[in-house]
Amino acid sequence: MSIFNLRSIGLSLLFAGFAAPPIALAQSAPQVVDSYPKQKLKERMKLREMEREAAARALATPTPKENIVRIGSTPMGIEMVVINPGSGKLGSPAFEQKRQRFENPMRETAIQYPFEVSKYEITFDDWNKCLADGGCAGHKPDDKGWGRGKRPVINISYDDTQNFISWLNRKTGETYRLLSEAEWEYVARAGQDAPFGTGYEMTAALANFDGKAPYGSSQTGPYRRKTEPVGKYPPNAFGVHDMHGNVYEWVEDCWNADHSGSRGDGSPRTDGDCKYRVMKGGSWVTHGYQMRAAARVRYVTDYRYDDYGLRLARTLN
């Protein structure tokens, strides 16, 4: 046998050896393609369709006119806005992007009483009045060198918020307090059946956060890396500023891992782990998804940080 024939036989055997595995792969490939990915694709398409329908409902449902910009009291110069009774959501639906397990289950909330909420987050100017009067346990929060004045007060714990509220109630004879988590979400959505009071979009033109990481398909923007003076961004339909971004806001609720125990009446959760309290709204440092109305985090009551702030509330008779 010639060298040429031996080389031909060797190459034939070599190519035959390489040909077998692709045939085996081709035979098994349909089992992979036809099962898991197709089912997941259907589920994602269904969720997207539900999200589009919810967005359409939100656009078609006007905000109740009686809830738009009603000025309330002004304790020690703090502007309050009246919020009328109504129904809202607590938590997030299954189709909401970037939702967390702590937002389950979504509950209906029926708030049957009017209440006030501060138009802006409490500022350094507000806090300094407390300090000047001997209140707030003498705590002078660090401003990180960003400035004080009309910037939201930062580096305050839940315990610090209670000291501020105690001082304010002593000065006014009223019963100001923190919002409950259910009230907070009601005010933040401002009549929208959506993740934000602005609907399904959140950009750096609407709030102070890491604009490089907006929500969903929103346009990117600047990341300012510090707080901004209150009132710089547009108010929501209830006339309240900065419900999303700038600083996290302490609320009254003790921490629970889900909403299954919510009473649905707007009251705060006093069960659960009360060493931790809930914070809402995201801040100057967070991504867009962390500012959704349903988003929630927990911190111990004595912990301070440079994006922790507060907002006031008061029940009206």
Image (spheres, rainbow, N blue to C red):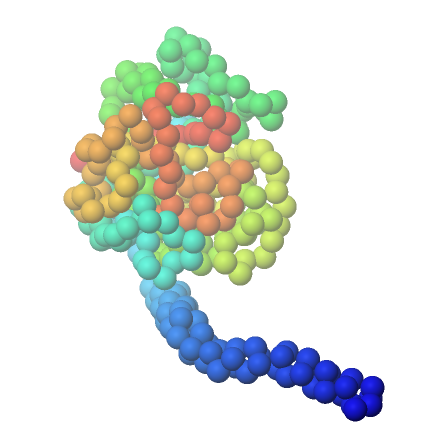
Please state which of residues 283 and 236 is positioned toward the viewer in this rendering: 283
User: Does residue 233 sit above or below 51 in this rendering?
Assistant: above
In the rendered image, residue 98, in percent from the top left (x then y), is placed at: 43, 53
Q: Quadrant of residue 298?
A: top left
Locate residue 17: give its quadrant.
Answer: bottom right
Q: How many marks?
A: 0
Residue 313 visible from this viewpoint: no
In this view, the residue farthest toward the front is 1
Vertical side of 296 occupied by 163: above or below: above
Quadrant of the drawing holding the C terminus? top left
Q: Is residue 94 above or below residue 111?
A: below
- The x, y position of residue 65, in whole percent, is 32, 55
Q: Position of residue 236 (x, y in %)?
A: 42, 48
Query: Along the horizontal axis of the image, is 182 left or right of 214?
Result: left
The one of 307 and 119 positioned closer to us in this rendering: 307
Q: Is residue 106 above or below residue 82?
A: below
**At x 29% / y 18%, what residue is drawn?**
166
Q: Closer to the camera, 6 or 157?
A: 6
- Pinpoint residue 99: horizontal percent, then vertical percent: 38, 52
Which residue occupies 51% across, 46% down?
Answer: 287
Res. 282 visible in picture = yes
Horizontal side of 208 relative to 236 (left or right) equals: right
Q: Is residue 156 left or right of residue 167?
A: right
